[in-house]
Image (spheres, rainbow, N blue to C red):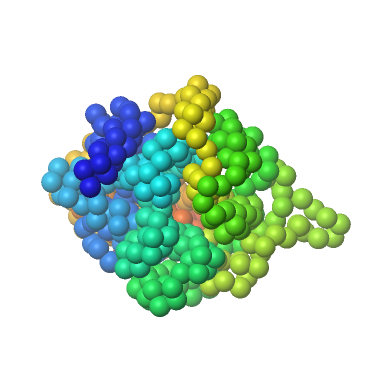
Amino acid sequence: MRGKIIVFLLFLCLSIFITWPLILHLNTYILDKQDGLLITWFLNWSIAHPLNYNANIFFPYQNTMAYSETMLPQAIIAAPFVKLFGEPLLAYNINLILGIALTGFACYLLFNKNFLLSLLFVLNPIYLGYAAHIQIINFWPVIFAIYCLKKKYWKRFVFFFVISSLTTVLFFYFLLLYSVVMRARLKYLILAIFIAVPFLIPYYLVSRQFNYVRPITDAIHNSVAPSDFLGQFFPGFAFIFIFIRGTLAKARVPLEKPFWVLFISSFILALGPALHIVKNTIHLGIMPFIPLPYTIFYYLVPGFQGLRTPSRWILLSLLFIFIIISQKVSKKVLLLALIILLIFDLKLPFVYQTVPRKVNSTISQKPVIYFPIYGWWDYPGVLKETERMYYSIGTWRPMFNGYSGFSPKEWEDRVKWLQKNHPSEETIKFIESQGLVYEYN
């Protein structure tokens, strides 16, 4: 136990180093004002109103927390810090630092206590490329679940399966794939699904309410194109080195076959519904695209039509390759790979944006609409909406404004109408009919 604590503390120090100087500015720095402030708002709402999906944005719509990920486990982790210090940004930044540290420690256990290989995983450009997305950088519940299934710690597997599912719905599907291929004991898999699914019901209700699924073109656009491996999803020279050395070497433990199946499966899913060399889809004669297996999942697997970013499956495929390599490379090879990574692959420091500290004041709780108003399509104007959401933390004043992973089509049309016509007699009548007051800020 003592050794494991030391390893975790080493990864915590590493995480603080990677994110430096964030530890000195936990209440004012953020990686991304758009998604970062959105996630901060989500975490703080879950801290203040756990399991209450009727949040204060998009008034008067209901279940607005289900317009994106709730990240309840991360909210629970951050709650003591936020409540003690009263600083909303702690919810985001504590989870960034701990997410990297816990992911490294989970890899250490999964990779048979191979510290160097675990270090190479958390420093990999693909993993660190998700730093701004707290729900993805907190990859540790998935890794712990995989580790527990491997060790046949069934009750712990159920626990981490549920924690993963509550972090992001995508992790639910990650672990379903792993559990099926690795033939998890059926009764524990059913138990894990049985516990997790009730937390996903609000997403189903939102989908039914608006008769909404994400168009397959969204999934195509947000999948990995082969050209991306030279840019956004370049895994690094260190990874290429250990991949070549590791996959060609003879395994010391006969576990390769199922993990190769998992790697290939998750890699293909990361390519999304259609093959496209670049972000523009390839056309083949009269066919609109060359379909890939993800298309079958999109149309047949419940919930897949609500997923927008198939590219995130690449992180799972990366993990499976590391599991394969963990049985096949020496410490000398890993040390050389680490040197290569530090010289060529590691892009530090992170670039932060400053958020003025939030000061709560006593204001009206009457529902409000702020002008000028923006939708998700208005960049950089939408940054104003995420700031309004952030500064509503604590007072939680209901607002017609909002930004999330989804917004109702009726709301979007109304925003465009308001942008074009306000102020006018018609817009003022609409605002009053909704019980709103309007303010400019």
Q: Count every numbered label the image shows and give the total.
A: 0
Asked whether 281 or 313 is in front, the reply is 313
Question: Given the current orientation, which residue lies at the most extreme left position?
Answer: 84
- Residue at 63% of width from left, 70% of height from top? 299
The percent position of residue 277, horizontal first and vertical second, equals 72, 44
Asked whether 107 or 382 is in front, the reply is 107
- Residue at 49% of width from left, 29% of height from top? 332
Q: Quadrant of residue 441?
A: top left
Asked whether 277 or 204 is in front, the reply is 277
Instruction: Left or right? Give the position of 59 relative to 231.
Output: left
Q: Quadrant of residue 285?
A: bottom right
For the question of whether residue 411 can be seen, the reply is no
Question: Given the current orientation, which residue lies at the most extreme right position?
Answer: 285
Asked whether 152 or 387 is in front, the reply is 152
Q: Is residue 393 above or below residue 17?
A: below
- Residue at 46% of width from left, 69% of height from top? 184
The percent position of residue 300, horizontal first and vertical second, equals 61, 73
Q: Quadrant of residue 154?
A: bottom left
The percent position of residue 153, horizontal first and vertical second, equals 34, 64
Q: Is residue 295 above or below residue 222?
A: below
Q: Is residue 297 above or below residue 327?
A: below
Instruction: Left or right? Give the position of 14 relative to 128.
Output: left
- Residue at 66% of width from left, 59% of height from top? 273
For the question of whether residue 44 can be seen, the reply is yes
The percent position of residue 47, horizontal first and vertical second, equals 23, 56
Instruction: Left or right? Give the position of 178 relative to 157.
Output: right
